[in-house]
Image (cartoon, grey):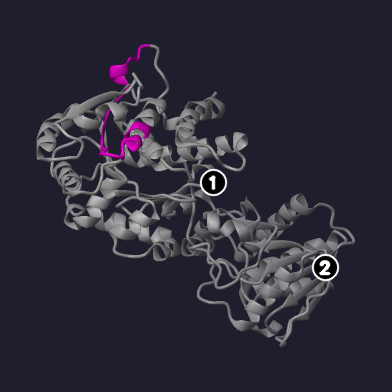
């Protein structure tokens, strides 16, 4: 279901443990890295004999990988020039060793001195081995000038080693600029920053190659961040020949108010399309027919009288909650006092696993004391605006550190958090982070969040653990968005079409 996404610090630790505890020498890992990088370059670019290749090598291990590549590419007949950014005497350890080997074999190696204006020699290929994933903070002026010069080499194929220089390996953001590569090779596992959508403009085609870190090391020191893979769909229960609607989960959707009836309807449709056996929508009785929307498959539970939530409706609803396998709370709920009182009452009640979405999140932001007592079998699904409201922050601040924001909130509230957006983040209270690899513009449609809430609720109703339900739901929802891009390449699809695509996606992926 997951593949590891180590942080730069975790990857560095894997290297150290492999070298110091397992006994595999650093030179071996560096040689493996350089060779794997060359193989990736050949696949991405093609024949290199006679081609002019410029390698920009920094002072660390990333530069050492570049020295290995230069030696191998020169043996293949390429016209190689390595520009190293520090004096030869300043190189240490494995990188110094690889530099000496390249010099002994006659590779053209020159010192890249800092100048006011950097002019790179004309090259068919530029290999960026300047900075590795250990880079943090802001680029120094000389390094920034090099990055900017590389990005101006429009006729060259830009190949980044491990990570495009200037890109933060934790956040995937430029600091303040980064190399814009056509292709990036990274080693052993993709670092977390490389998996985030904001890094796509810099990594180009991302290739992960293995350099010899033993699985034993990865198991002993597991990465805290994980990438959701297509194996997530394997956790969706396979239909049984003897199954019936009562054994497939009965979900209760709570929401809707005057003028906001469509959201609950959309969540209901998606819950059915995600395999829930029974779907009931609880709403004020005065708008129950609007919520049903002529869909006979959707059941309604009209409460009280009128079209806005009040104490009578809350009193009628609370005793019913335990009859259901899962809840979804919030779509179209409204933001008046009655709606806030409803969310408060549900939080304080005994209820099955629940998804808090949309206006339920507004209620939690307005009454933050509820977050401290919310059930640990709950999933919260905010978009960045809702997240910012809940933590009294701003959208830019949330987007600047999506992982950190999600993790801090989840740990503090002891709830599972789904921070929606391109590369959705799922954060668990135990510090585990899962990242969706999908960025689907076709999901940027009104009601898309209601569809996701219905999918997650349906999975919960079938007895799937909240963490798995969230990860499966996010990945499945994302695939539906990608599926719709084939029919609507410039968007224009509507939310009901996202729901209708859910079964089709499973057919294509699992059958």
Percent position of residue 89, x then y: 68, 84
Q: Residue furthest bottom?
A: 116
> Dot 1: what SS?
helix
Which residue range is magenta in the image? 242-266
Query: Which is nearer the N-term, disc 2 or disc 1?
Result: 2
Q: Position of residue 81 (x, y in %)?
A: 81, 72
Q: Residue at x 44, y 61 (%)?
A: 399
Residue 192: % across, % down: 50, 57
Vertical relation: 328 (above or below) 120: above
Quote the CA–CA distance across marks 2 and 1. Answer: 36 Å
- Per the image, label 2 sits on a secondary structure element best described as loop
Image-based side of 43 in relation to 258, left or right: right
The answer to which quarter of the image holds residue 431 is: bottom left
Q: Residues within 10 Å of mark 1 (few under 14, many from 20)?
A: some
Tell me what residue is drawn at x 49 percent, y 53 percent: 5
**Residue 308 vertical placement versus 181 (above, below):** above
Residue under pointer 1: 441
| Image disc number at residue 123 | 2
Dot 2 crowding, Cα within 10 Å, few <14, some 14–19, many 20+: some
> Would you say residue 260 sits in the magenta stretch?
yes
Measured from the top left, where is residue 483 in percent x and y? 56, 35
Q: Quadrant of the C terminus?
A: top right
Q: Is residue 96 something one can see in this rendering?
A: yes
Magenta stretch: includes residue 359: no
Q: Residue at x 76, y 69 (%)?
A: 153
């Amino acid at each position: 279901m997951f593949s590891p996404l180590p942080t730069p610090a975790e990857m560095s630790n894997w290297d150290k443990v492999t070298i110091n505890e397992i006994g595999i020498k650093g030179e071996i890992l560096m040689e493996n890295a350089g060779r794997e990088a060359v193989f990736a370059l050949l696949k991405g670019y093609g024949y290199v004999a006679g081609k002019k290749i410029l390698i920009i090598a920094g002072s660390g291990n990333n530069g050492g990988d570049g020295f290995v590549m230069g030696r191998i590419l020169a043996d293949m007949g390429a016209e190689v020039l390595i520009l190293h950014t520090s004096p030869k005497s300043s190189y240490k350890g494995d990188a110094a060793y690889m530099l000496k080997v390249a010099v002994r074999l006659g590779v053209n190696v020159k010192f890249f001195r800092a100048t006011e204006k950097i002019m790179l020699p004309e090259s068919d290929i530029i290999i960026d081995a300047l900075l590795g994933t250990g880079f943090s903070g802001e680029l120094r002026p000389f390094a920034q000038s090099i990055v900017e010069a590389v990005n101006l080499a429009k006729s060259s194929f830009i190949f980044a080693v491990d990570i495009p220089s200037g890109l933060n390996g934790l956040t995937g953001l430029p600091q303040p600029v980064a190399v814009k590569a056509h292709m990036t090779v990274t080693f052993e596992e993709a670092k977390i920053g490389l998996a985030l959508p904001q890094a796509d403009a810099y990594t180009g085609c991302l290739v992960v190659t293995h350099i010899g870190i033993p699985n034993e090391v990865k198991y002993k020191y597991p990465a805290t961040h994980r990438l959701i893979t297509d194996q997530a769909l394997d956790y969706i229960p396979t239909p049984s020949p003897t199954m019936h609607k009562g054994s497939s989960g009965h979900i209760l959707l709570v929401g809707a108010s005057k003028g906001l009836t469509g959201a609950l309807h959309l969540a209901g449709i998606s819950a059915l399309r995600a395999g829930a056996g029974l779907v009931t929508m609880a709403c004020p009785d005065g708008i129950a027919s609007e919520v049903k929307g002529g869909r006979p498959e959707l059941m309604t539970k009209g409460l009280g009288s009128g079209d806005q939530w009040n104490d009578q409706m809350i009193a009628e609803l609370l005793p019913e909650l335990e009859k259901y396998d899962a809840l979804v709370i919030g779509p179209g709920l409204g933001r008046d006092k009655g709606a806030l009182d409803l969310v408060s009452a549900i939080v304080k009640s005994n209820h099955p696993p629940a998804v808090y979405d949309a206006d339920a999140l507004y209620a939690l932001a307005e009454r933050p004391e509820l977050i401290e007592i919310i059930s640990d079998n709950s999933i919260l699904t905010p978009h960045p605006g809702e997240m910012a409201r809940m933590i009294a922050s701003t959208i830019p601040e949330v987007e600047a550190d999506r992982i950190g924001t999600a993790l801090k909130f989840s740990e503090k509230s002891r709830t599972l958090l789904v921070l929606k957006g391109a590369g959705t983040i799922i954060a668990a209270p135990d510090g585990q982070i899962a990242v969706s690899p999908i960025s689907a513009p076709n999901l940027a449609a009104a009601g898309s969040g209601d569809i996701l809430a219905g999918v997650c609720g349906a999975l919960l109703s079938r007895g799937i653990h909240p963490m798995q339900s969230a990860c499966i739901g996010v990945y499945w929802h994302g695939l539906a968005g990608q599926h719709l891009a084939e029919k609507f390449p410039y968007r224009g699809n509507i939310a009901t079409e996202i729901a209708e695509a859910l079964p089709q996606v499973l057919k294509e992926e699992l059958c």
